[in-house]
């Protein structure tokens, strides 16, 4: 059984831009001297990162990278990697990050699925496509060369990234995300305090959609991303980042949050806010944190890779820890639609049914998997309060998970407790042929 959660999609267009690099360049124009990246004691300004990514983009275009290409990137974490991802956006291409620790068979298989013009890497190997690496020089040197890419008419509906699933249940599936999947989170209506003065450690693997929340959340709004060589965040490291780098915000998995709270709850002191997601929030750990840090905003976030990393947020309270239904998933984000459906039917408040997500955050589908996409993203009927039903594409796994409150205070709850990558159904407006 099902109930409708009132969608918050705004009919107005995005304000600052509809592409990832558009938002980054807007931040670079506003805050050119602000620190965009910090790594190993070296700070890169927005002006330098913008110019360096321009240089990389010009070099990529000279090697045949064009709008619509999906380019694998096999690089170590660091400032050059971030400049390369921005460069691909500026070419109109999307990226797919490959981890150097993955088996060669997995790497070559995913490269073939992407059908790219080249592989960005300095790692030697018998790759199925030509390999190219950026110049082995400091980003400031690249920036000073003054290279500029040819303009490209990229829009919010263009692909910007491909996130591959783990493949634990079969062949890894590539989820093709568009620019507007992330732009809706960072255009103007922020879910937390973002922008200049906010400093966040980057711990999520770039191959995971959580990378959107601890890297792009900073670089698209004027904040600072602190890149780490060791991404396992232990209490000692967190304390050092707060004291030495000025870290005052963080995103982490629920599992990591639980470990840090259990090991050293005092390590969070100095943060302004902390968001977490990926699985069910544990009331006992949340209670311990809020009791120790009543002045730190603790945010529960929910969203799967098929719908742009995040669709709901909830600032948690001690009262939430006593909720017999579990800690709520939260309120619906702008430019996002959340429904609960009984099959194709939207139902009255109080019913329980299948959580359905949509709007600009909906992914294009699965890379090279037309049959999988057509089977998973199916048409249904859904309508907002007081509005006519609208034909929408939905993605379903057939597992009912959610109930609702009244439309005046849209809140999604997961009675089974799944809050991160839980199976659900995603719905979104669809017109014309599938992109």
Image (cartoon, rainbow, N blue to C red):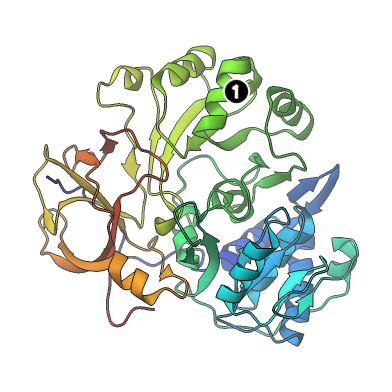
Q: Position of residue 277 (x, y in %)?
A: 47, 38
- Left of 411 or right of it: where is 67? right
- Left of 385 or right of it: where is 274? right
- Say which residue appears at 49% left-offset and 51% top-offset: 168
- Left of 112 or right of it: where is 174? left
Q: Position of residue 253 (x, y in %)?
A: 53, 36
- Left of 78 or right of it: where is 67? left
- Say which residue appears at 34% left-offset and 55% top-offset: 336
User: Hey, which quadrant is residue 286 in on the image?
Assistant: top left
User: Badge 1: few (under 14), some or many (20 or more) residues near its Cα, within 10 Å?
Assistant: many
Q: Is residue 411 above or below residue 217?
A: above
Nearer to me, 381 or 33? 381
User: What number of labels is visible?
Assistant: 1
Secondary structure under badge 1?
helix
Q: Position of residue 124 (x, y in %)?
A: 83, 68
Q: Is residue 140 above or below residue 148?
A: above
Is any atom of residue 415 visible in this view? yes
Figure quadrant of the N terminus: top left
- Say which residue appears at 47% left-offset and 63% top-offset: 173
Q: Is residue 176 above or below residue 306?
A: below
User: Hey, which quadrant is residue 432 in on the image?
Assistant: bottom left
Q: Is residue 361 above or below residue 154?
A: above
Nearer to me, 247 or 404? 404
Figure quadrant of the C terminus: bottom left
Return the residue at label 1: 260
Q: Position of residue 161 (x, y in %)?
A: 55, 66
Is any atom of residue 97 visible in this view? no
């Amino acid at each position: 059984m099902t109930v409708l959660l009132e969608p918050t999609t705004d009919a107005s267009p995005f304000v600052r831009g509809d592409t990832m690099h558009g938002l980054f360049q807007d931040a670079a124009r506003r805050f050119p001297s602000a620190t965009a990246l910090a790594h190993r004691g070296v700070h890169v300004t927005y002006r330098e990162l913008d110019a360096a990514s321009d240089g990389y983009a010009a070099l990529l275009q000279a090697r045949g990278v064009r709008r619509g290409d999906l380019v694998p990137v096999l690089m170590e974490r660091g400032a050059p990697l971030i400049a390369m991802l921005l460069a691909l956006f500026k070419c109109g291409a999307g990226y797919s990050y490959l981890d150097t620790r993955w088996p060669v068979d997995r790497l070559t298989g995913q490269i073939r699925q992407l059908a790219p013009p080249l592989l960005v890497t300095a790692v030697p190997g018998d790759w199925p496509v030509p390999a190219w690496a950026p110049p082995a020089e400091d980003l400031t040197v690249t920036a000073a060369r003054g290279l500029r890419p040819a303009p490209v008419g990229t829009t919010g509906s263009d692909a910007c990234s491909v996130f591959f699933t783990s493949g634990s249940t079969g062949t890894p599936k590539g989820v093709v995300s568009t620019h507007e999947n992330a732009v809706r989170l960072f255009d103007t209506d922020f879910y937390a305090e973002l922008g200049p003065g906010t400093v966040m450690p980057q711990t999520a693997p770039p191959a995971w959609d959580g990378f959107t929340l601890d890297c792009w959340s900073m670089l698209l709004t004027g904040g600072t991303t602190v890149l780490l060589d060791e991404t396992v965040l232990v209490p000692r490291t967190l304390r050092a980042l707060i004291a030495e780098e000025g870290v005052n915000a963080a995103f982490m998995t629920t599992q990591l949050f639980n470990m840090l709270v259990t090991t050293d709850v005092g390590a969070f002191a100095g943060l302004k806010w902390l968001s977490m997601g990926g699985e069910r929030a544990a009331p006992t750990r949340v209670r311990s944190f809020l009791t120790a840090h009543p002045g730190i905003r603790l945010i529960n976030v929910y969203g799967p890779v098929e719908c742009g990393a995040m669709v709901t947020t909830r600032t948690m309270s001690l009262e939430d820890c006593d909720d017999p239904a579990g800690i709520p998933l939260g309120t619906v984000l702008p430019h996002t639609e959340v429904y609960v459906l009984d099959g194709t039917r939207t139902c009255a408040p109080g019913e329980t049914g299948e959580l359905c997500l949509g709007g600009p955050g909906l992914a294009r589908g699965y890379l090279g998997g037309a049959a999988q996409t057509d089977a998973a993203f199916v048409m249904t009927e859904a309508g907002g309060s007081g509005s006519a039903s609208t034909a929408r594409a939905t993605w379903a796994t057939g597992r009912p998970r959610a109930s609702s409150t009244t439309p005046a205070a849209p809140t999604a709850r997961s009675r089974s407790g799944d809050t991160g990558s839980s199976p659900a159904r995603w719905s979104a407006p669809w017109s014309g042929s599938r992109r």
